């Protein structure tokens, strides 16, 4: 059989699935991607509502991600840069802090802010320098503790932890207690220090669209949900049976394959609310963090402080909630609207849309940066991909997609599986 004749299917058109397809194509194979929705991206999508660009959850790309540099054309994405800092809302006051080494305008606001002591600021600079020198491999081989314990062990005061580190990393880790592994804190901190947070001009979804545009020999089946994956077949929700030689599952295998042990994935969730406002209260492209302990809001951002491909009539405000809540949708909108006014001085014109993202980030321990292709193999003809195999990041999703595809290729090229499949055609 020729390489293009093998039936290789990828379940899910998220980032890991697209990278798996790209890797297979590069090696001469012609995979097929099966996606339950009508387009690519998975969690990395952008909707256009009344010309406003609404990302599925407030997301940024860290341009220091090694795999993003490898797989994405940054220039074509027209990446818009965030300022390396934050505006902190606390007790009715606002303070600005940032990295003065990369943007001098942050020097005096940061030095004279009351967010943490002078010693805290010195420790922050030292941590920046330490992590610049520490390799990603070293970070993910370091002993694990919680991010909160890590910060305490580094000698940071409770004040700076509560006022900055908790709201900042809670918005990234999607949990408010900083239980997330210290490896992830070091990795994210290093990526922020080595580069910038950026966003494509057309929204975060342009990343997935660009990856799809790189594929020339991959077929896509949209609006079809996979309900079962067998050794040689895939079953769709409408009963259609698809013959396959190899399958890469990117969404978790537990619901698709029976009698699996230890394949359940725990997920972190969040709410992302979009509002239309008459004017921006933050003109610069900088993230706002709400540090009040009783606040439901974690972070906010005025999207049109960056250049966007499309723009509505007024200003677009994104608000993220990571804390668990029993409020219904109407109550949540009302609570967030009230907090925006009382804690941030922001007057809402109208609510545009709310996303409840139930599977926003995998909740995992024992974080890794990489995995061998053989470790992605669940069964002889079934492989796994997805950031849940490594750590919750775009970089990890790309690595896992590569490794799963490489696992399939290795199985084909070892000769045993090839002979078995080829015999079916004799």
Image (tube, rainbow, N blue to C red):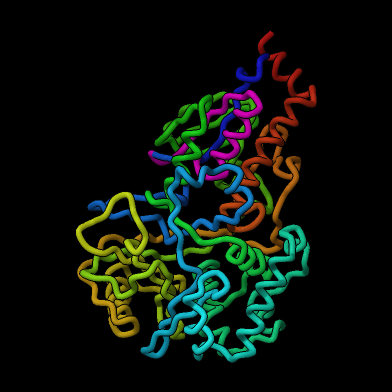
Picture quadrant where residue 408 is located:
top right
Q: Can residue 248 be seen here?
A: yes
Residue 10 on image: x %, y %: 56, 35
Picture quadrant where residue 53 is located:
bottom left
239 relative to 248 in the view: left or right: left
366 relative to 354 in the view: left or right: right
Residue 16 on image: x %, y %: 57, 44
With respect to residue 423, does 239 lie above or below? Answer: below
Looking at the rendered image, the quarter that the N terminus falls into is: top right
Residue at position x 66%, y 80% in the image = 151
* Magenta run includes residue 20: yes
Residue 68 on image: x %, y %: 58, 48
Residue at position x 64%, y 74% in the image = 147
Residue 54 on image: x %, y %: 34, 55
With respect to residue 42, does 369 lie above or below? Answer: below
* Magenta run includes residue 31: yes
The residues colored magenta run 13-38
Picture quadrant where residue 157 is located:
bottom right
């Amino acid at each position: 059989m020729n390489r293009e004749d093998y039936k290789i299917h990828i379940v899910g058109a998220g980032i890991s699935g697209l990278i798996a397809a790209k890797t297979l194509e590069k090696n001469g194979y012609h995979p097929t991607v099966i996606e339950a929705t009508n387009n690519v991206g998975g969690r990395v999508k952008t909707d256009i509502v009344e010309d406003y660009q609404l990302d599925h959850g407030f997301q940024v790309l860290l341009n220091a991600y090694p795999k993003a540099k490898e797989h994405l054309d940054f220039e074509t994405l027209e990446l818009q840069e965030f300022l390396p800092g934050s505006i902190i809302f606390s007790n009715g006051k606002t303070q600005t802090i940032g990295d003065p080494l990369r943007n001098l305008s942050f020097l005096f606001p940061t030095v004279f802010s009351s967010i943490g002591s002078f010693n805290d600021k010195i420790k922050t600079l030292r941590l920046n320098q330490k992590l610049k020198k520490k390799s990603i491999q070293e970070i993910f081989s370091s002993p694990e503790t919680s991010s909160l314990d890590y910060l305490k062990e580094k000698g940071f005061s409770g004040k700076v932890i509560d006022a900055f580190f908790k709201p900042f990393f809670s918005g990234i880790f999607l949990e408010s207690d900083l239980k997330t592994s210290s490896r992830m804190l070091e990795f994210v901190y290093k990526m922020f220090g080595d580069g910038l947070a950026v966003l494509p001009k057309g929204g975060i979804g342009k990343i997935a669209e660009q990856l799809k545009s790189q594929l020339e020999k991959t077929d896509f089946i949209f609006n079809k949900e996979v309900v079962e994956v067998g050794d040689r077949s895939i079953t769709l929700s409408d009963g259609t049976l698809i013959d396959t030689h190899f399958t890469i599952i990117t969404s978790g295998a537990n619901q698709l394959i029976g009698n699996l042990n230890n394949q359940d994935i725990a997920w972190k969730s969040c709410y992302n609310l979009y509002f239309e406002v008459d004017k921006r209260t933050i003109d610069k492209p900088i993230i706002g963090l709400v540090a009040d302990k009783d606040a439901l809001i974690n972070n906010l951002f005025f999207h049109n402080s960056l250049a966007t491909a499309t723009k509505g009539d007024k200003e677009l405000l994104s608000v993220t909630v990571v804390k668990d809540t029993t409020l219904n949708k109407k109550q949540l909108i009302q609570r967030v609207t009230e907090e925006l006014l009382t804690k941030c001085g922001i007057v809402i014109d109208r609510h545009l849309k709310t996303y409840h993202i139930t599977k926003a980030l995998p909740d995992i321990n024992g974080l890794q940066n990489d995995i061998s292709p053989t470790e992605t193999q669940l069964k002889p003809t079934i492989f796994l991909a997805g950031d849940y195999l490594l750590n919750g990041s775009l970089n990890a999703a790309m690595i896992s997609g590569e490794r799963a595809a490489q696992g399939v290729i290795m199985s084909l090229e070892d000769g045993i599986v090839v002979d078995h499949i080829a015999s079916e055609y004799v």
